[in-house]
Amino acid sequence: MYISNTNIVDVVQGQVVEHQTIAIQDEKIIGITPTSSTPLKGSQRAIDGTGLYAIPGLWDMHVHLSHDDIARNSMLPLYIVYGVTGVRDMKGDCFECNGYGDYSHHTVKQWVADIHNNKLVGPYIIASSDIIHDIDDVTKLVQQSKPSTNLVEELIHRGVHSIKLYDEVEKNAFYALMEEANRSNLPVTGHVPFSVKASEASRLKMKSMEHLSGVIEECSSEEDRLRRALETATGEQDSDYTSIVGQYIATFDSQKCSRLIDTLKQNHTWQVPTLSILFNRKWQSDSRINYVSAQERKFWQQLERWERKQFGGKTQGDIPGWNHLKFQVVKQMYQQGIKILAGTDSSYWGIFPGSALHQELELLVRAGVSDLDALRAATIYPVQYLEQENVMGSIEAGKFADIVLLESNPVKEIGNTRKIHTVIVRGKVYDKAAREQLLMQIEHYVENSIDNNKAKEK
């Protein structure tokens, strides 16, 4: 197969190489040559790339999938429809699978196998552990069935890519886990626990920090006092974080933040801001709701109610100054040389799988990231993070044929990533008709899920 006469966006060199022909065989790119020197053989499929821009397949570096039925029939195909050929699932396993949307590493491995064998349409999946709130509790759970096995050993055995931590992890447990994880070369990611400074977590080699967690806290001139208030509020059943967030906004210290960012850069700590979660309020009237199952809509409603309870009836995006502060920190990080990864937190409430990534890229640019570096945040930077840049992340001979053909240049305007002409995943082509067919199948699945839900309610 050939893509003829296209313009390749070289995300490594930061330039557009015009009038190129890309040769693809099976899953790989086998050659790239100037169009004028490449005779096309009539027996091979040719995609006319004239006027189009070829970018590497996009990555969403913070997603949450769901149980098998929903993932297979809506979420995973949606990523392909919107040009997202790789995802980092931040809750890709469960120790006790008894909650909504829970699924184990066995399910993830089956998705990966079925996608590889063309039995399922979906992106390349890198999966973390379950979300760990209390390291001691999870360790005890592991040792009930494997008394001589520690947590890190069990996670490596289960095949997860990284350990996902949450806010409540105790400081001593965090230090012990980091020591063992570093010894075993298993990355630790997620929220910086309230008990730990972001600079501490960075020095201990926490690989990525999500949502600017820990960073905003350490940028406050009254960090210690507010950290204690945050820990206290976390332990209370009915907490209103609005006042605490307001104080973080009022006490932001740019110089203190700059010193923290220098530490993050020195330790190569990646940042995934997930700005999209600040702009999700109108999800129920969004046309993309047609691709969200009845169960998932119900789950989103629960999550929205939970967030509004946490913030005194508001969403976090409603708090005056909060969005501006997050944008300011992202800009400061970018200007000081931090590599940022594009992640959306789909399927948090109102964050639509696949399409949300394009919004995230636009928000990164709005915060001050260049169009080119926003594109890099969803292409070459993710695979550098994954240490897979030798096989994907850019359009080069020998790499996987994960390519999105766009109708306009995204380096001039990042919003042009929405103008998708064709998606190619490991050499398999999804043109406009194929992607529309996927959307029709997803919509049909969703309609049936709504009808079935209504029948159950009766």
Image: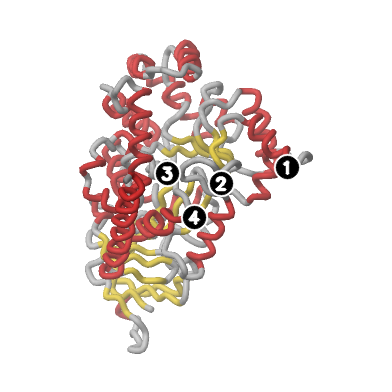
- Give the Cα separation between the discs numbered 2 and 4: 12 Å
The dot on residue 93 is: 2
Mark sitting earlier along the chain (1/2): 2
- Give the Cα separation between the discs numbered 1 and 4: 28 Å
**What amino acid type should be assigned to the residue bearing mark 2?**
Asp
Q: Which residue is mark 3?
A: 341
Where residue 160 appears, as percent x and y from the top left, is: 59, 48
* Residue ID at (47%, 66%): 400
* Residue ID at (42%, 17%): 238
How many tags in the picture?
4
Mark sitting earlier along the chain (1/4): 4
Q: For the residues carrying marks 2 and 3, which lies nearer the camera in this image?
A: 2
**What amino acid type should be assigned to the residue bearing mark 3?**
Leu
Q: Which residue is mark 4?
A: 125
Mark sitting earlier along the chain (3/1): 1
Mark sitting earlier along the chain (3/4): 4
